[in-house]
Amino acid sequence: MKQIEPFYEAVNHIQDTALKIQKTGRKIMGYLCSYAPEEIIHAAGFHPMRLFSSKSEIILAESHLQSYCCSLVRGILEDSLAGRLDFLDGTVFPHTCDSMQRLSDIFRMNGKYPFFADVVLPVKLNTKSARTYMADVLTCFKNDLETATGHEITDMDLKSSILIFNQIRKNLSLIYDFHTKTPGIITSRDLYALVKGSMIMDRKKAAELLSCVVSHLERLNPPANKGKRLILSGSVCDTPDIFDAIETAGGVIVGDDLCTGFRWFDGLIPEHRPPLSAIAARYMDRIACPAKHSGLLTRADHLVSLFQKNKADGVVFLFLKFCDPHAFDYPYLKEFLDKQGIKSTVFEMDDRQQSLGQFLTRIETFIHMI
């Protein structure tokens, strides 16, 4: 599908994409979590670019981080120390897990990039005070960006950025719906390229290209895919070979709550409210990360609802090795699904040690079981 090619270009050539954007006069702001307030970064004149590990051998980072930090954190630090992120004009770290905070400390203390910000969002999301606090934190972040750039970020700037990001979210939601209802319409690898590419490339261009993808998919009428319908649950999955393996094994992915998937674009920002409070509302109300708290059973309820809505046959948990927040949540999620009669399985991933042969064998067994 030629409409997807620009997204693969961005995904496969991240540094080149960044340099092309910089030539237009827009500076690059790297961020490391789906809770990063991209709309504010964009409104300040920066280009928000999500950072992924290049998956190179870990050499330089070994002396800074313990071996039990996840491969994402260690890989990004390795890329920074090796100079592969020298195109960055700044970095933004939302407060999430302990490993990410230690990475934040290292970036801050080294002072390698001109701008640095920790965005300490509330952990407990289901209180009125948390909403007020969230808006206050975003206001402080906006002020920091204004100081760094020397110009005011107006409500008009914010609203303009909100419209662009909402268009991306609307288009990706439509594409996900197409894939859920007719899985054969687009492969999971292509779907991931659309999502990841949208985190990397120019956002206005991404919104326009995604609209073209939607128009193309609307005209297709592929045969039904009779594979076992699976929901993926977890954090970061930057290994599209896993999606291929699932489809090879006779499964089809019909939904996810990954932060490199649906969780990144879940929910729209209200366009007719004061922009900062509207941005805060969206980050409060979207699917919660396990590093946040929005109720004892919120994540489990959402997972069951997604399973039922998408008429799934099973749930596959995908966790990065040493990801404590997801590891802590897994036992209760597994128990909750068992009580609902929902079959599930779990896999630990590592960017540099992934055995796809073993994964394929285990996922084939699970699909046969359900």
Image (spheres, grey):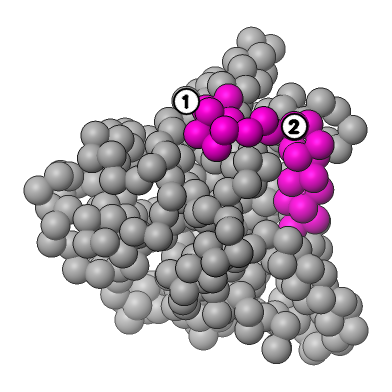
Q: What kind of secondary structure does the magenta stretch mostly adopt? A: helix
Q: Residue 220, position in %: x, y?
A: 85, 86
Residue range highlighted in magenta: 143-168
State the residue at coordinates (53%, 62%): 22
Outermost residue on the front side: it is 150
- Label 1 element class: loop
- Alpha-carbon neighbours of circle 2 within 10 Å: few (<14), some, or many (≥20)? few
Name above or below for residue 216 compared with residue 304: below
Q: Tag 1: Cα neighbours inside 10 Å, few (<14), some, or many (≥20)?
A: some
- Label 2 SS: loop
Q: Residue at x 41, y 54 (%)?
A: 88
| 310 and 87: which is toward the camera | 87
Q: Amino acid at mark 1?
A: Val
Residue 7: percent from the left, percent from the top? 61, 75
| Quarter occupied by residue 241 | bottom left
| Residue 121 percent coordinates (x, y) | 52, 26
